[in-house]
Amino acid sequence: MNSVAIVGNGPSSKGMGEEIDICDFVVRTGIFPISSEDAGKKLSAWCWHGSPKTCPGRHSEPQGEYETWFSVNTDYRKIYPKFWEHAAEMAHGHGLIRVLSDRAWNRMCKVTRLHPSTGIAAVAIAIEALHPQQIKLFGFDATKKDASGWGDANPTIPWHDPCGHDFLTEKMMLSDLLTKNLWLGRPCHTELIWPAKPEGIA
């Protein structure tokens, strides 16, 4: 696999449709509300956590043929079996289903100490399952509130504490991949490209 685009829900993906769709594989996360005209139309995989209650605006699956990536671990699927049943039903008939491995989940939790976001889980699944030469990030705009030196690409995005994720730490994880070729402290041969990276990342 050469290039994988991972499209988050932030506004910096607007107007990047051509650059997104030219990638070999395009992963869209959560509800991906940005219009397809602005952020492309290609959908190779949909990454989400399987809970319609915490995924507002997305009560039905996207149409077409694509992979479904679930960004939660085994414990989550055992604790919330109804969510998992619903999610599996939505995924049925669209294509391959991938689940974030417990190994990757546990490694991320040791770093973030909070529930990993769907976006960072999509990066983990892409590295683990696809081994791409490049990952390109779009719409990854949320940063922990008032984090000095880690301003958002678009500071108006409405993320507020507590949100259940440590976006500051997650962006530091991405910074290690971008600048040091390290993923969760280990060498990684996937190149990260981040057109709207925050100012705090070299």
Image: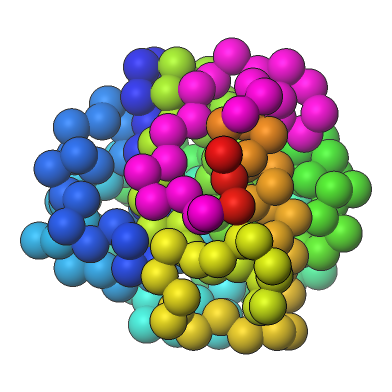
Q: Residue at x 43, y 41 (%)?
A: 194
* Residue 154 point in image, percent of width and height: 40, 70
* Residue 121 point in image, percent of width and height: 62, 48
Q: Is residue 53 above or below residue 110?
A: below
User: Is 186 inside the magenta-drawn segment?
Assistant: yes
Q: Which residues are magenta?
A: 179-199
Give the quarter of the figure containing the C terminus. Answer: top right
Asked whether residue 61 is in view, the answer is no
Give the quarter of the figure containing the N terminus. Answer: top left
Does residue 169 appear to the left or right of 188 in the view shown?
Answer: right
Q: Residue at x 70, y 47 (%)?
A: 172
User: Is 15 inside the magenta-drawn segment?
Assistant: no
Does residue 141 appear to the left or right of 110 in the view shown?
Answer: left
Does residue 54 appear to the left or right of 15 in the view shown?
Answer: right
* Residue 8 point in image, percent of width and height: 42, 58
Determine the image quadrant of residue 166.
Answer: bottom right
Q: Is residue 7 above or below residue 54?
A: above
In terms of depth relative to the viewer, which is nearer, 194 or 107? Answer: 194
* Residue 98 point in image, percent of width and height: 55, 39
In terms of depth relative to the viewer, which is nearer, 97 or 116? Answer: 116
Asked whether residue 174 is in view, the answer is yes
Determine the image quadrant of residue 79.
Answer: bottom right
Q: Residue at x 38, y 76 (%)?
A: 58
Total number of numbered discs in the rendering? 0
In terms of depth relative to the viewer, which is nearer, 173 or 5? Answer: 173
Q: Residue at x 43, y 62 (%)?
A: 153
How does the figure colour the protein chain or chains? rainbow
